[in-house]
Image (cartoon, rainbow, N blue to C red):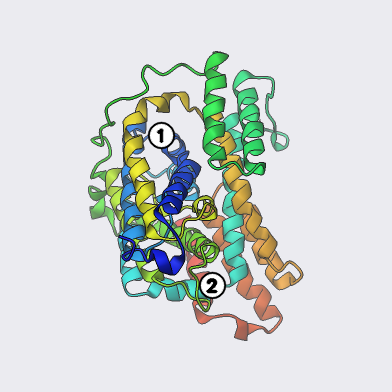
Amino acid sequence: MKQFFHFSDRGTTYRQEILAGMTTFLSMAYILVVNPIVLSEAGIDKGAVFTATAVSAIIGTLLIGLLANYPIGIAPSMGLNSFFTYSVVIGMGIPWQTALTGVFISGVLFVLLSIFKIREKIIEVIPQDLKYAIGSGIGFYIAFIGMKNSGIIQANEATFVSLGNIQSGPTLLAIFGFIVTVIFMVKNIRGGIFYGMVITSIIGMLFGIIEKPSAIVGAIPSLEPTFGVALLQLDQIFSMELLAVVFTFLFVAFFDTAGTLIAVANQAGIVKENKIPNAGRALLADASASVAGSVLGTSTTASFIESSAGIAAGGRTGFSAIVISGFFAIALFFSPLLSVVTSEVTAPALIIVGALMASEVRHIRWERLEIAIPAFVTIIMMPLTYSVATGIGLGFIIYPVTMLALKKHKEINPIVYVLALIFIAYFAFVL
């Protein structure tokens, strides 16, 4: 086992890897309660999503551990589940069944792109500043959703949005949860987001804001409401509606997953000579998990940035990933607890994860106006239009314009022009 995971080469031990795996699981365990709530707003059965979330996390994390030897956890993406529900299903009016088919097709395309290493090559030519803008923009978008769901902000006819009723019980509970979680996070307590959700749930039950669960341990929720649904809409593969979904999932996931992978690999010391060993295998594991997840009944999976917590605790090999998978398997039996985790409880997690993702703005070269403007547009338009794809598209259209205005066409890869044209067509004929 030690030889398979190269313990000696990476200077680690079983104890170190187990502790790291447990730390990463605690840091990302909130996805088990947040993802069902987010996708249930799209009309999907909450219990089925819980099981699909756990099983897809087990599959993806096992694959990245065994194939790529990475100490990374994979699960349904926080950015992409929000995109699935609020942009695709609610915003575009597409049924969740069709949206799952879009996830499946984009996942299959991901697998093919990963096998032929096309995915790696495209990622390399995208301007780094726009990658940072996409990641941080998704962060602002997620935080906006968290504030909306908790009632911290609300609709206002005069100003579009305004401060909500912060005297209401549910909103006060969300604010309390946010403060508690922030304290955990700034004190660098491992699993701070998870512990914050637990404490907020308990306080909510004590004050009668949240109903107490009927049980703690229970049977694993059935996948029947969602299993295989993604395969039933394949006859619509050439419809403009489904093509739009596939394209947006494919494009948004492209940057969401690659950025996390690069960041975490750097932290773990895996990157050698500006290259990520086994990157193709890692991307293949991620893509395969998305295919499996869509068939099970959940949105696109991604490498979790919370894996950095486990790496900080000493995780260096895929054995940590095996440990993470084991904890997700155990968690399958605790689904009754799902009922106590309301939108007020999950809102702090959305806001804080958004803050972590938004920190990528510091890497953008703001002193260069031709870069700052498309990056800013990418970021600001995601929450303002309630659409990740719109923000990305507008950024990619403006970027070549500003660069060409300064006659810096040599700095633009031809693929960027192609992407800009695709987005122009997307806005003109799809939206």
Q: Residue at x 25, y 33 (%)?
A: 222
User: Pointer 2: what residue?
Assistant: 126
- Along the horizontal axis of the image, is 134 left or right of 307? right
Looking at the rendered structure, the number of numbered marks drawn on it comes to 2
Q: Residue at x 22, y 47 (%)?
A: 232
Between 261 and 395, the one lying in front of the other is 261
For the N terminus, the quadrant is bottom left
Q: Quadrant of residue 10?
A: bottom left
User: Pointer 1: what residue?
Assistant: 40
Taking the view exactly as shown, the residue that stands out farthest to the right is 367
Tell me if I can see residue 152 in this picture: no
Secondary structure, mark 1, is: helix
Q: Is residue 232 above or below residue 119?
A: above
- Residue 136: x and y in percent read 61, 55
Secondary structure, mark 2, is: loop
Q: Is residue 318 above or below residue 401?
A: above
Q: Quadrant of residue 367?
A: bottom right
